[in-house]
């Protein structure tokens, strides 16, 4: 990005009709099939593809702290771009209070979980990644014993046990959260995760293969949630995102194959 910033001044980007450097309008068309833009020229000088440069520009604009993860090899450019584009910006790191890094889970999403899955509301429940507390507010509408915290207490070092856990976890630490939940949670834990979380050898091994604390159920939201939309908030649900989401429910001692169901009507 430092190299791009220098070259962009040399090529005087942002002038005239070079708006492609700020939008993705033509980036899905190969640079070999259209007139070269300033971005194409700069990408050639940097020995990377024009689309790859666009993704780096997008990442830098949305959350420049993610560039450190790319430098350290903790995440690929494509993975960072897809995650940011899907609206999960806060999951990639950075202050949870940052406008670019934090998105609340609309309260209606949690209410639908409580309506569609059976819970004993006298049991203790923990929300270990509460952010500004949208999920916690809904839990307190139903449960009398709610524990909630965020980065000031690391769930991965937690020693207390709880009957239940309900959260929208940091995606990059989801396997760690699942592994920890299987040790601390007595009865059931529920995580809001992308539908694509179902596949993958490593996720199967750590998240789904256990017979002692197996996956019981997946509840899919039919309209894709758009958690990263500017108007999405604790009180406002926006749909139409690129990523499908579901509640994943694990229950200790559950016997049988996981079941799947859908939530089509998202009216609160």
Image (spheres, rainbow, N blue to C red):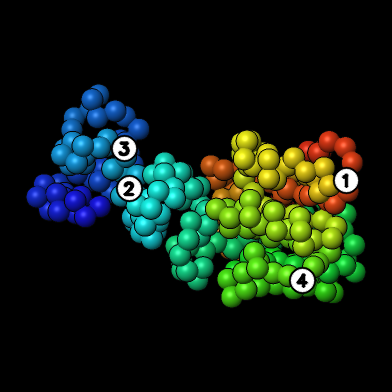
Compare marks 2 and 4 and give the one earlier in the sequence: 2
| Category of crowding for the residue at label 1, using alpha-carbon neighbours closer than 10 angstroms: few (below 14), some (14–19), many (at least 20) | some
Residue 254's disc is 1
The CA span between labels 2 and 1 is 44 Å
Q: In which quarter of the image is residue 162?
A: bottom right
**Residue 199 occupies which quadrant of the picture?**
top right
Q: Mark 2 points at which residue?
A: 56
Residue 186, image quadrant = bottom right
Residue in the image at 68% along x and 45% along y: 206
Identify the secondary structure beneath mark 3.
helix
Question: Where is the C terminus found, in terms of image quarters?
Answer: bottom right
Point out the tag, 4 or 1, that comes first from the N-terminus.
4
Q: Residue 51 carries which label?
A: 3
Could you tell me which secondary element the residue under label 2 belongs to?
A: helix
Residue 102: % across, % down: 52, 64
Q: Residues within 10 Å of mark 3 (few under 14, many from 20)?
A: some
């Amino acid at each position: 990005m430092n190299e791009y910033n220098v070259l962009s001044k040399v090529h005087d980007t942002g002038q005239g009709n070079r708006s492609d450097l700020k939008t993705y309008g033509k980036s899905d068309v190969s640079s070999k099939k259209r007139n070269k833009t300033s971005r194409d020229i700069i990408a050639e000088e940097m020995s990377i593809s024009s689309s790859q440069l666009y993704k780096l520009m997008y990442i830098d604009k949305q959350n420049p702290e993610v560039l450190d993860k790319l430098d350290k090899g903790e995440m690929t450019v494509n993975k960072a771009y897809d995650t940011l584009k899907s609206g999960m910006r806060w999951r990639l790191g950075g202050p949870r209070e940052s406008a670019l890094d934090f998105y609340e889970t609309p309260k209606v999403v949690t209410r639908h979980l409580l309506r569609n899955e059976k819970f004993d509301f006298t049991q203790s429940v923990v929300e270990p990644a509460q952010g500004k507390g949208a999920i916690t507010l809904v839990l307190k509408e139903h449960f009398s014993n709610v524990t909630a915290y965020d980065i000031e207490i690391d769930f991965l070092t937690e020693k207390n046990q709880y009957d239940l856990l309900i959260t929208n976890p940091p995606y990059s630490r989801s396997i760690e959260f699942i592994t920890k939940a299987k040790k601390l949670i007595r009865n059931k834990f529920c995580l809001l995760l992308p539908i694509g979380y179902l596949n993958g050898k490593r996720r199967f091994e750590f998240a789904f293969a256990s017979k002692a604390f197996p996956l019981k159920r997946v509840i899919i939201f039919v309209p894709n949630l758009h958690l990263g939309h500017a108007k999405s908030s604790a009180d406002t649900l926006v749909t139409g995102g690129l990523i499908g989401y579901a509640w994943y429910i694990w229950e200790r001692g559950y016997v049988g194959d996981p079941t799947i169901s859908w939530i089509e009507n998202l009216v609160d």
